[in-house]
Image (cartoon, grey):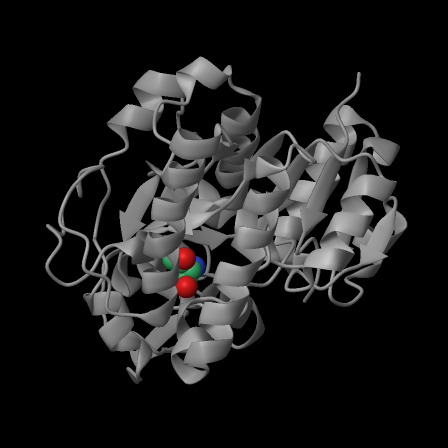
Amino acid sequence: MKKRILIIGACGQIGTELTIYLRNKFGINKVIASDIREGDEALMKSGPFEILDAMDYDAVEEVVIRHEITDVYLMAAMLSATAEKFPMKGWNLNMNSLFHVLNLAKEKKIEKIFWPSSIAVFGPTTPKKDTPQRTIMEPSTVYGISKQTGERWCEYYFNRYGVDVRSIRYPGLISYKTLPGGGTTDYAVDIYHKALKHKKYICFLNAETTLPMMFMDDAINATVSIMEAESKKVKIRSSYNLSAMSFDPEEITESIQKHIPEFKISYEPDFRQAIADSWPQSIDDSEARTDWGWESKISLDEMTEIMLDNLKKKY
Ligand code: AKB
């Protein structure tokens, strides 16, 4: 098989698990992991790795050519909360890295791109419940603006140059293997660690903040499914809505209390509350289901069980 994959941002929350998954599926040497710095031991030991700055076009091109890459997963990004602190850095990283891979595909140096979008493309004027695929999109965060702009460019490169780019709008992602960094949905990972370690958690969002979320296994499954789907099935070339579950901090607390009854949550909302308030509460993902067969498998209570069972071994 000719396929050779490059993961840019392989040491991040999604990249780490995606790298291991793709290596199991396609073979260790078919998947080149890369990041601006080295990642955790398990990832570094799992196969070939390149230090690579996603903002450096020449360096990305050199790695693509040297490894005869066909498919790129561009997972490097600055997430919502950090990008509010460093707006221009966030914009430059999120946009330049995307243009680099789109242009490499336009020049036929790679065949296929996966680029992650986010529920952050929606804004305060978007309908909050069962947010449709196509609706009002007026994002109010730098991250959201960069993802919405990226979606428009992906669709443009597909229509104008035939670039085979595929994308999904991730909700908040939850995993016991890797930690998120700089997102607004990060509390939903931290809460499990703190529940086991301290039996209490101070949440930076208020009790009623319902957000769309997903367990990492579902997210990896969706990512690889859309990349491996027949091209004609991928009808949307901006980005697909994707959904698994929605909950607020009270509901995840109740789910944890089924295993740790003494666990307590308290609230000290910070600047991330405004970001969360601008996002949808639930997502209509019917087009992903119809077009390429997406189906989520893991519910909140199932996720809680998996998270606590696995994190217990750490603490
Ligand atoms: C964030 O919170 O910034 C991300 C996202 C929803 O894209 N997890």
**Number of numbered discs overlaid on the protein picture:** 0
In the image, residue 262 lies at what x, y percent?
41, 69
Is residue 5 visible from the viewing direction of this image? yes
Front position in the image: 57 or 135: 57
Q: Answer with the quarter of the image where residue 227 lies.
A: top right
Where on the image, by quarter, is ligand 1?
A: bottom left
Front position in the image: 191 or 220: 220
In the image, residue 141 lies at what x, y percent?
30, 70
Front position in the image: 211 or 251: 211
- Residue under the image location 51 percent in, 19 percent down: 229
- Residue under the image location 24 percent in, 42 percent down: 283
Q: Answer with the quarter of the image where residue 146 lies.
A: bottom left
Q: Answer with the quarter of the image where residue 111 lies.
A: top right
In this rendering, the answer to whether 82 lies above or below 132 is below
Q: Is residue 178 left or right of residue 89?
A: right
Q: Is residue 190 left or right of residue 208?
A: right
> In the picture, which quadrant includes the C terminus?
bottom right
Q: Is residue 26 left or right of residue 302?
A: right
In the image, residue 290 lies at what x, y percent?
31, 17
> In the picture, which quadrant includes the N terminus?
top right
Is residue 200 visible from the viewing direction of this image? no
- Residue under the image location 18 percent in, 38 percent down: 132
In this rendering, the answer to whether 40 lies above or below 291 is below
In this rendering, the answer to whether 60 lies above or below 156 is below
In this rendering, the answer to whether 44 lies above or below 169 is below
